Amino acid sequence: MTDERGPVGDDDRRHLARAIALGRAGMEQREGGPFGAVVVVDDIVVAEGWNRVTSTLDPTAHAEVVALRRATARSGHFELPGATVYASGEPCPMCWAACRWARVARIVYANDRAMAADIGFDDQFLYDELDRPTRDHDVPLVHLPMEAGRELYEAWAADPSLTRY
Amino acid sequence: MTDERGPVGDDDRRHLARAIALGRAGMEQREGGPFGAVVVVDDIVVAEGWNRVTSTLDPTAHAEVVALRRATARSGHFELPGATVYASGEPCPMCWAACRWARVARIVYANDRAMAADIGFDDQFLYDELDRPTRDHDVPLVHLPMEAGRELYEAWAADPSLTRY
């Protein structure tokens, strides 16, 4: 199952073990689900996090998002080129895309989405839903074009002084 | 293009126009990209947001995530059953999954992912990447199973007193 482009070393095992330990700590402190994450740049841990959904009432407070937000705040930039994210569980589509928006270089995880499904989490379901046509989604996704929307994007394109990301 | 399960009314147009106006306000205040969002429950606006990626150095601060976090904080629960999310642009995979984790009932958007691509945003690219096998991803996603990971999920499953989500 290992990505053939991702040779795994002792540093990877150490950081991933730390992500798992963080997931356990967060769970034992009853802050959320059993998930932890570590962001590493140049073999230095720049941020750690665990799931805080139920304790902070934030459905986006997955371990990876928590760790990425801390990492970018500390680094002083909204992107983390060269970073590796270690996650106890395979990132859900939200966390995967968060990693990609942050321009990380690599993602390493231990438990896969099937294991998450076995303990009641929807990661597998969400990936399956993304594979289905929108019209078959459980939650309707309605496209309602508006001229003001087009004008908004045109205004963005017309002002190169606005910071791109 | 409209989802056939999503009859569109004047309330929808009003809330979506507001989301677009918020996107413009955030852009003009140089807080981030040209994206706004509104969360509505029972035709009441419970939270608004605009993109704050570049100003808060948070790659996850997309308009929908900002609005959802505010909505759940105010509602006192990490889920928003019955809510509709109005977004100026089609949610990226991160925002789409955030909506789904929040258990919203409906998502309405104006500009589609192709329009976002036209002004330089990666939403379309990320959806395409999700359609590709992991081994073809630009960013390696490495599966490194660890026994401690399995034990962590087993500990979660064994304690029904932990809050599920």
Image (cartoon, coloured by chain):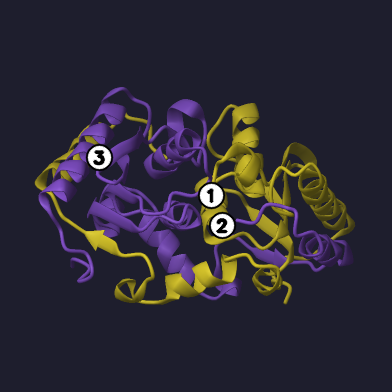
Chain colours: A yellow, B purple
Q: Chain of mark 1?
A: A
Give the number of the disc on residue A98.
1
Q: Secondary structure at mark 1?
A: helix
Disc 2 to disc 3: CB gap under 8 Å: no
Residue B159 appears at what percent x and percent y?
80, 59
Q: Amino acid at mark 1?
A: Ala
Categorize mark 2 by other alpha carbons within 10 Å: few (<14), some (14-19), many (20+): many
Is A4 on the left or on the right of A123, as rendered? right
Distance of label 2 from label 3 (alpha carbons): 25 Å
Q: Nearer the viewer, mark 2 or mark 3?
A: 3
Q: Residue furthest top?
A: B29
In the image, residue B31 above or below residue B161: above
Give the number of the disc on residue A96.
2
Q: Residue at x 26, y 59 (%)?
A: B114
Disc 1 to disc 3: CB gap under 8 Å: no
User: What residue did someone put label 3 on?
Assistant: B19
Choose between A92 and B137: the one closer to the eye.
A92
Q: Residue at x 39, y 70 (%)?
A: A138
Residue A52 appears at what percent x and percent y?
66, 43
Query: Which of the 4 quarters of the picture holds residue B124?
Result: bottom left
Q: Amino acid at mark 2?
A: Trp
